[in-house]
Amino acid sequence: MKTSHRSPFVQWLIVTVGLIAVGYILYWLYSRYGHRIHIFPAKDTHSWWGPMFPALTGTVQGIFFGIWGTWASITAERQKNSAPVHRLLKAMMSVGAIQVALSILAFANIGGDVAGRQPFYVWFPLLLTGGILLGVGWLNLFFLNREDRKKTIEQELLKMKAMDS
């Protein structure tokens, strides 16, 4: 496995500077165009939220899962802390499953007057982000489990060699 030539502090510094830059860009966009952003729905519609709410939640989810992914890649590279990474992957997949279920509820008019058939900007972002979270989480969990199995087999073989000699 190829290891990074950067120290963990340098990796953390790069991520932090990048997140500060993203935050500054978002602040500038909101200060320039904030009066046009409608997070809450209009009073005459029955949608769950306004057309700009998915952008806000997508930004928050992207930042959170981006920080988590950076941490997971740094720790997985050094083959440490696989249990917290597995727990967070399972939590990420459950958030994705909840989002997919909500998007099906919003699209399919299940629930009568409570849900109704929601507009595109309600059900599609839920389906998109939920599907991405499920897919990425499943792939990462699959490859992490495979690496853990290889590591366990190697450790068992070393123990057997030590017992034989």
Image (tube, grey):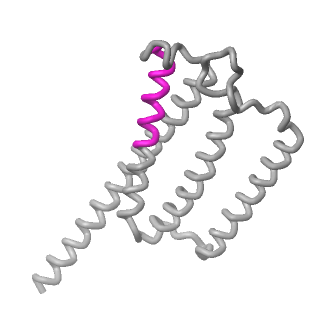
Residue 123: x and y, percent? 55, 24
> Can see residue 135?
no
- Image quadrant containing the C terminus: bottom left
> Is residue 3 or residue 78 the one in the foreground?
78
State which region is magenta.
94-109
Whether residue 12 is situated above or below residue 22 in the rendered picture:
below
Residue at image location 55% in from the left, 51% down from the top? 65
Which residue appears at 63% of the width and 75% of the height?
Answer: 9
Residue 99 within the segment the image draws in magenta: yes
Q: In this view of the protein, which residue sits in the foreground, 141 or 159?
A: 141
In the picture, measured across the screen, residue 66 lies left or right of residue 25, that is left
In this view, 52 is above or below 151: above
Q: Is 67 colored magenta in this rendering?
A: no
Query: Is the magenta region chiefly helix, strand or loop?
Result: helix
Residue located at (66% from left, 62% from top) = 15
* Left or right, 138 with reference to 43: left
Residue at image location 69% in from the left, 64% down from the top: 16
**Furthest-left residue in this view:** 164
Pick whichever, 115 or 18, lies toward us: 115
* Quarter of the rendering occupied by the N terminus: bottom left
In x, y percent, where is residue 37? Answer: 78, 33
Residue 121 x/y as whole percent: 63, 23
| Image position of 165 (left or right of 153) | left
Q: State whether residue 163 is above or below residue 156.
A: below
